[in-house]
Image (cartoon, rainbow, N blue to C red):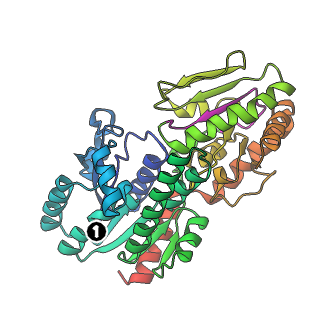
Amino acid sequence: MRILQICHKPPRPSLDGGCRAMDAMTRGLLNAGHSVKVLTACTEKHPWLPELIDADWIDKTKAEAVFIDTRLNKVDAFSSLITGDSYNISRFHSSDIEHRLTQILRTNVFDLILFESLFTSPYLKTVRRYSDGLAILRAHNVEHRIWQHLADETHQFTRKKYLNWLAEKLEQYEVSVLSDFDGIVAISAEDLEDFRELGCELPIQLVPFGLDDAEWPLDTSGPANHVFHLGAMDWRPNQQGVRWFINRVWPLVRQRIPHATLRLAGRHFPSTWSVPENMGIQVLGEIENAWDMMTDSGVMIIPLLSGSGMRIKAIEALAAGRAIVSTPIGVEGIPAEDGTHFMVASTPEKFASNLVSLLENPELASEIGSNGRKWAKTHYENDQLIASMVSNFHEVYQL
């Protein structure tokens, strides 16, 4: 097939889970012999850095990037209060992207147009105007759920009210636009069910994130001697979750294991970020290679209190054989077994108890890590997932 992949941020370099998910889709389609053209937005937060990207990938995808300014604009945000538009979505609408998209569609024929995330949906009208290709929304999350969770966890009245308003407007937009596509690819079973509950009657299929054989890490299952978190800290759910962990969970761990250490890594740690002293917490910030941390001898924590979709880092940690302790939201979309493939905790006390058990019991950490790796190997092989998706497209849409 001839495929156009429209992205809301560059898939490469893979700076976060969203980038990894888009890049896995591109690679899977290319490996299956399809032609893929990538048109992506780039922003101040997610710049286009061709010097850091494999030239062969750029050549194969004919990747192009168009800059848009998605920084918070108080005037536009206030205007959205008046007009009732979703400011989350309108920030990603660009006349420059529309212009380039129009040029591409006028000079190329595509069988399939993949819209990566709800944030690319403003360009559906342009695609419909110039293309007869199948228009599929690849939903990375049920977007309004993230903002609703953030509002629920916020206590400051004005901020809570505004977050609720954003969630409401985003939900209205999400519901209204879903039926305009030909189908949806959901990244988790929970998201698929949410779309159904929102009244979506389109064909929906589940296609989780996967890893290629070539990028599957070596087995590092074994004892654990520290705790670590890896995640972009300009994403509000990560900020919220890490603060909750530091304030509510980590003191309980240190009471039981006074020498325990916690490593925090990820891009864009806020300049105002501070951690308690003498608590064994190391703020590493952005690291050169995330796999180095992922395959070290630590226990990964995923302390998310809000979010949707699938945590890419959870799949990667499972693949590496690392033990994981997570809140239920942190492993949402991964139908593995609590206590066998990872450990799940809903309270600070249970979260701390799970960590202590893994740090004090090398056999338990090794067993859970090994079980998780074997389970991931049978469920998240990328080429198989993409082949199944394409086969479904042919069957449902008679391509």
Residue 261 seen: yes
- In the picture provided, is 79 more to the left or to the right than 308? left
Residue 90 colored in magenta in the image? no
Position in image of residue 262 (x %, y %) = 69, 26
Residue 220 colored in magenta in the image? yes
Q: Quadrant of the N terminus?
A: bottom left
Label 1 neighbour load within 10 Å: few <14, some 14-19, many 20+: some
Count of residue discs: 1
Q: Nearer the viewer, residue 334 or 96?
A: 96
Residue 209 seen: no
Position in image of residue 204 (x %, y %) = 49, 75
| Quadrant position of residue 396 | bottom left
Q: Nearer the viewer, residue 373 or 144?
A: 144
Is 258 rendered above or below residue 344?
above
Q: Quadrant of the C terminus?
A: bottom left
- In the picture provided, is 195 more to the left or to the right than 368? left
- Give the magenta part as a residue range: 219-233
Task: Write the residue at 52% across / 32% down.
Answer: 266
Task: Write the residue at 76% across / 30% down.
Answer: 224
Task: Write the residue at 38% across / 54% down.
Answer: 88
- In the picture provided, is 39 more to the left or to the right than 273? left
Position in image of residue 304 (x %, y %) = 63, 46
Q: Which residue is mark 1?
A: 124
Q: Tell me which amino acid carries mark 1.
A: Leu
Q: Residue furthest top?
A: 278
Q: Nearer the viewer, residue 231 or 246?
A: 246
Position in image of residue 33 (x %, y %) = 36, 62
Q: Nearer the viewer, residue 97 or 113?
A: 97
Query: What predominant SS class does the magenta segment belong to?
Result: loop
Identify the element where label 1 is drawn.
helix
